[in-house]
Amino acid sequence: METLLKKLFQANSLTGDDLLYLLNNVDAGTEQLLFDLAHKTRIKNFGKKVYLRGLLEFSNYCRQNCLYCGLRRDNRRVSRYRLSREEIWRLCQRSYELGFRTFVLQSGEDPFYTDDLLADIIAGLKERFPAAAVTLSLGEKSRHSYQRYFAAGADRYLLRHETAARPLYERLHPGMSLQNRQKCLQELKEIGYQVGAGFIVGLPEQGNEELVADLLYLKNLQPHMVGIGPLIVHPDTPLRDWPNGSGKKTLLCLALTRLLLPEVLLPATTALNVLSPNGLERGLQAGANVVMLNIAPAAIRVKYELYKGRVQDNVEGPALLEKIKTRIIRAGFSIDMGRGDHPGWTSNREKESSTD
Ligand code: SAM
Ligand code: SF4
């Protein structure tokens, strides 16, 4: 076990069988060694830096019906909202003044926001805040749409693959296919985005074999960012009777991802922090190096309810920022509010924009 972990630490690679062996046999002692090696790897590549991102969930309308998600279209109990272009710019302005240099614009798959409107929103942000990065997380779109947003100035795109196990993917995402999800990720990379993939831990019928498929998919894709969080069940979804995902298994996956992709931007996700009060600190100690803070007012945040308990208090704006900064520093890390690009990323924007 220790030999395998050291091999992974040195070579940043392991076979599927070895990864499966690790996940099946990890005990308290080897778990600590895994976290220590993941921590060493993050220190080597990023020091103690934790990048802060401003997350703005601008619409909770969604045309998809993912079985686990509280925003799914068949959930009639959601009070739906959309933010206007001006509201989005105003909230980003406020978070820019607080020091944020990455805005993450996330929503359900909401056709109200046409490509023209999205391009306008993105271009408006880049015009106002040329020093800031714009990250999108809007779900599956055509290559043409992705290209338009990139030409308007978007820098990064988050699209978790959710699970790389095809039958599981298809059961959980009616009307969607893993093939298309992966095609989107490939296209985003080709266009020149910094791309984020990732998966949910604790999905029904997901065992260690399926998690190994996720890790191998990530190793092969070489994304710039990876989002990994536990499933947290929502009572108004078909998974209402399913247990939450395991925080510990999520931490193991974070640490393995740090070792497989040493330079990756890896958030300590909100879902991890909802599962346990010190989830954020434990995520950072297992190799995570990014934290996303919600920049919408609490009255909006409560409506973006992917799962219950997502918004834990009413703290917002500068008070929220101070609270999170204190926690990060107390956990032994330092704050970086810069753009925080992937270390290996170089822009090919000029080339792509001229071919659009
Ligand atoms: N609609 C876009 C998409 O699906 O890519 C972006 C928004 S979606 C709400 C962002 C992520 O939330 C998804 O990729 C999924 O992994 C996560 N998510 C949704 N419901 C969840 C749940 N019940 N527990 C944990 N994560 C969940
Ligand atoms: Fe929509 Fe994203 Fe939720 Fe799926 S995970 S229902 S695409 S918001």
Image (tube, grey):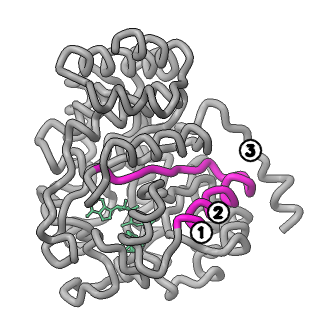
- How far apart marks 3 and 1 lie (CA) works out to 25 Å
Q: Observer-nearest residue: 246 or 18?
A: 18
108 sits left or right of 296 in the view? right
Q: Residue at x 29, y 87 (%)?
A: 74
Q: Which residue is mark 3?
A: 347
Q: Which mark is residue 105?
A: none
Question: Residue 115 placed where, x, y %?
Answer: 63, 80
Question: Residue 114 placed where, x, y %?
Answer: 59, 84
Residue type highlighted by circle 1: Asn
Q: Is residue 30 visible?
A: yes
Distance from mark 1 CB to nearest ligand 1 atom below 8 Å: no
Callout 3 environment at 10 Å: few (<14), some (14 to 19), or many (20+)? few
Q: Residue at x 18, y 86 (%)?
A: 77
Query: Do residues under tags 3 and 1 come within 8 Å of each other at their CB atoms?
Result: no
Distance from mark 3 CB to nearest ligand 1 atom below 8 Å: no
Choose the circle earlier in sequence order: 2 or 3.
Answer: 2
Secondary structure, mark 3, is loop
Q: Please tell me whether residue 59 is drawn above or below residue 232 in the rendered image.
A: below
**Res 33 quadrant in image:** top left
Q: Residue at x 28, y 69 (%)?
A: 68
In what quadrant does ligand 1 lie? bottom left
Q: Which residue is mark 2?
A: 183
